[in-house]
Amino acid sequence: MDDLDRKILAELQLDGRLTVTELAARVKLSVSPCHRRLRDLERTGAISGYRAVVDPAAVGLDFEALVFVTLRWEDQDTVTAFERAVAEVPFVVQAQRLFGETDYLLRVVTADLTAFQQLYDGRLAVLPGVQRLTSTLVMKHVVNNRPLPA
């Protein structure tokens, strides 16, 4: 990965819908070499996909909470069962395993507080191995969907 690859990645993070021609112009490279580099970045996994960034409020998901999960046990079977089950909850839009006292951090979106409470009691609290859930509500996003540094 060189500086030119980093420039390509930076441009695509700002606008993933650029044509190869537009991308080549922005990074000051001819189209063929730019296209080759782009395919190499995709092939090696530096670019893992393309998608639309959807505003949650625009689709009725105005409520967001961060849920900290502590498991009863941290054996492989419990961890695997928990991770499989949490991956099936569509309102969990991000899940991260952590070092420290808390085992997982879940980012959850719902329509409102009532929907969150139902999700919390009906799906999250009964996930395999859960000992404790602690949640906090998101007031506002200060930094969101920031591109990775070049």
Image: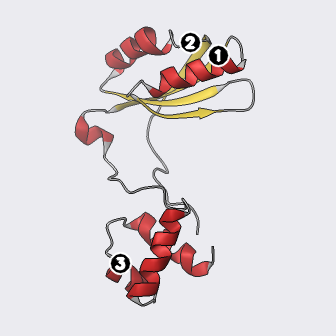
Residue 22 screen position, x and y as percent: 33, 81
Q: Residue at left 43%, top 13%?
A: 123
Question: In which quarter of the view is residue 77 placed?
Answer: top right
Q: Are marks 2 and 3 in contact (CB under 8 Å)?
A: no
The disc labelled 3 sits on which kind of residue? Val
Q: Secondary structure at mark 3?
A: helix
Residue 113 visible in rendering: yes
Relative placement, left or right, of 57 versus 6 is: left
Q: Residue at left 31%, top 75%?
A: 19
Residue 142 screen position, x and y as percent: 48, 48
Crowd rating for badge 1 (residues with CA inside 10 Å; few <14, some 14–19, many 20+)? some
Q: Is residue 29 above or below residue 120?
A: below
In the picture of the structure, the residue carrying the numbered disc 1 is 78
Q: Are marks 2 and 1 in contact (CB under 8 Å)?
A: yes
Q: Is residue 40 above or below residue 100?
A: below
Crowd rating for badge 2 (residues with CA inside 10 Å; few <14, some 14–19, many 20+)? some
Which label number is shown at residue 20? 3
Which label number is shown at residue 124? none
3D distance between C-alphas at marks 2 and 1: 7 Å
- Say whether disc 2 or disc 1 marks the residue closer to the N-terminus: 1
The outermost residue toward the left is 59
Crowd rating for badge 3 (residues with CA inside 10 Å; few <14, some 14–19, many 20+)? some
3D distance between C-alphas at marks 1 and 3: 46 Å
Q: Residue at left 38%, top 28%?
A: 90
Q: Secondary structure at mark 2?
A: loop
Q: Is residue 91 above or below residue 148?
A: above
In the picture of the structure, the residue carrying the numbered disc 2 is 128
